[in-house]
Amino acid sequence: MPATSEDLPLQFARTKRFSLGVPRGFAVSPDGARVLFLRTASGRSTTGLLWLYENGEERPLADPLALGDGGDAGGEVPEAERIRRERARETSAGIVSYATDAAVRLAAFALSGALWTVTTDEGVTRRIPTAGPVVTPRPSPDGTHIAYVSGGTLRVVRADGTGDHALAEPEGPDITYGLSDHVSAESLERTRSFWWSPDGTALLVVRVDNAPVQQWYIGDPAHPARPPRAIRYPAAGTANARLSLHVVDLDGHRVDVDLPQEAVSHPDGEWTDPAFEYVAQADWSEAGPLAVVQTRDQRSAYVLRIDPATGATTPLHHLTDTAWLEFVPGTPAITAATGLVLTTQEGTRGLLMTGTGVRTPEGMYVHELLGTAGGRLYFMAAEEPTEAHVWSYDTENGFVRLTDEPGVHHAAVGGDTVVLDSSTLDGQTVTVLRDGTPAGRIEVLAERPVTRPHPRFLTLGERELRAALYLPTSYEPGSYEPASSESVSSASGHGRLPVIVHSYSGPGWQTVVKAARWHHAVNQWFADQGFAVLSVDGRGTPGRDRAWETAIHGDQLMPVVEDQADAVRAVAELFPELDTSRVAIRGWSFGGYLAAGAVLHRPEVFHAAVAGAAPTDLRLYDTHWKERYLGHPDIQPDHYDRCSLVAHAHKLTRPLMLVHGMADDNVVPAHMVRFSAALLAAGRPHTVLPLAGATHLVAQEGVIDTLLRMDLDFIKKSLDPRTA
């Protein structure tokens, strides 16, 4: 248990945003008997272990400390693995990922670059000798071999440790086999780049040629003697990595996959580029290898069947959209009962089962295809944006919702077993269901926040904005002073409450959810310092429908800023104790971009801002993510100019603090430096807080906890009329 003197910021840092002790990465055996998962040993331990749940009990299968590894403390993690962890926003060490054979009898994982295996029947761990440091090891379906990447080479070794040899070796320093390029990992969330054939005799592998991608350098200002780190970063409008697919057998014989070069019947637009540049997804199931390729302008995609013997491809489906295509994670998939399962783009994002012609019901927003078992399709979907539930579909029963309690529910499936991972406002539980009946639980060891959040969920304004409002725990509604009060309210309930808006409100992430999330606790902590805190999911956020998501097409800033401003006005009508003459806004990443944009463009609503890791010049962000929303910067420069913070720096009239990790290779520090330079050139005072050695995910104790307190101090001083 945390010490009684420990406040929320310190607990937040020491628990890595309450992520430690949370079970994740579930793998269920096809017979439903075994469940593997990752979890640290407590809510304070940062070392991940591999666990087995079987016969109603859980036990550790592999502990890095018992294996003589100190949780990567020696700094020997290979560079490719360090990059993979950064893309995955990994906060722990030790065993942070693993893969199994088809029967979930053998698991493989890497520790400090060494390859380890463990059997689930006897729990025998074994270190497998390899030719070099190991990244992304994955057993063959039959468990006889393990493929892995070392130094950009795809290699394979027998499970008994013999026969290590290269399957595909890079032809140059900028080429890799089996590793994801920056765009695939960061923007497409395709973390895998090789897939075994079901019989374990061959692999489908991605070859990446980074030579066309411009090279950037990230230095460490705190250590000037160290050389800068070189990265390949495909900024908007510049060249992407060249990707190709290959089928490689265990003897190293290679068949090149004949990928199409351009899409036909491609949608028109101000900017069109029908060339296929992205491998959005791939898989190899009993139905054969599949791949999804997407055009540079992201408005066409082919689902391709691959002939592994010849490399020939056959289009199974042509997806198009006039704005951009998005894919439900887990799709496409092929099952005997439903045929090809695809993402639909019309109306609400859903699924189409081509074998039956059945679509998910209109109004159901599908977040993820979870898997298939027993002839059933399992998926995660929302009918109300603040919740997400687990559903199943089969031809006999149709669509069945498996969860009822308001929250965000996820699942892993195998045989007659469903591992239900449920997050509600009361906390997180992991329940093992057998034939639909609870059969046990997997323990969640995460700490509960010392500050208990009490969000009020609201629907605001004409656009029915989903919002969460946090008031001080001891605050008594209705007990407030007139608007002329000059004092910042305390948590005692006296005085009108100044407002802090803390929203992300960008693509890919929702904050207004009825689930145990770290930002609920952080927002409540700020509220308990004497504020009303408001979080809003505006246009562009997921969970509603395609029109809501694509409303930011061509302008990723002003619609989102307007939604936040409208929400402030609407919530003040419901809660007159809120003082809208004192409104601050804070955020990180897109939320930081939103915060800075809000004080630039709507200073009459937002009176101070803290902008963390803000992408201020969108030409500096990566191709796939920015071109999706704004097009090509050379053809549609007005989109980028309109959304740039740098171009509008002269408009700043409110207090602004910029915070940035100086080792950030996602939103590089140049964003903050360029914006600060433009503000200085325009004579606009502002505050800059560089975080030495910090990446895009800031979780270090002594940094994130101090940062929360500095945010609070800056906001208090900025909103105090006596300092104006």
Image (tube, grey):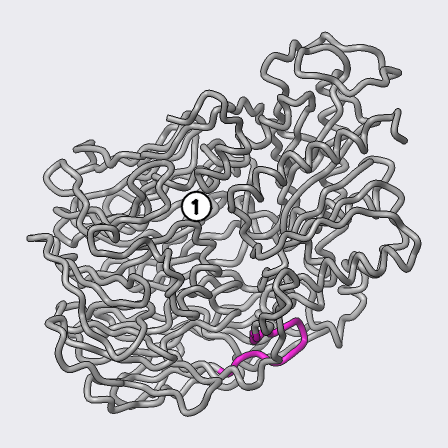
Q: Quadrant of the N terminus?
A: top left
Residue in the foreground of this view, choosing between 385 and 224? 224
Residue in the foreground of this view, choosing between 415 and 142? 142
Amino acid type assigned to the residue bearing label 1 in the image: Pro
Magenta region includes residue 234: yes
Residue 65, placed above or below residue 387 = below
| Whether residue 395 is visible | no
Q: Residue 281: horizontal and vertical position, in percent?
A: 41, 69
| Dot 1 crowding, Cα within 10 Å, few <14, some 14–19, many 20+ | few
Quarter of the figure with residue 249:
bottom left
User: Does 222 sit left or right of 343 as displayed?
Assistant: right
| Whether residue 272 is visible | yes
Q: Which residue is mark 1?
A: 361
Q: Main secondary structure of the magenta part?
A: loop
Q: Residue 367: horizontal and vertical position, in percent?
A: 44, 49
Numbered-mark total: 1
Residue in the foreground of this view, choosing between 96 and 384? 96
Rendered residue at 22%/74% (across/down) = 197
Residue 587, placed above or below residue 554 = above
Residue bounds of the magenta highlight = 230-242
Rendered residue at 76%/71% (across/down) = 636
Rendered residue at 75%/33% (across/down) = 715
User: Does 355 sit left or right of 525 as displayed?
Assistant: left
Residue 687, placed above or below residue 427 = below
Q: Quadrant of the C terminus?
A: top right
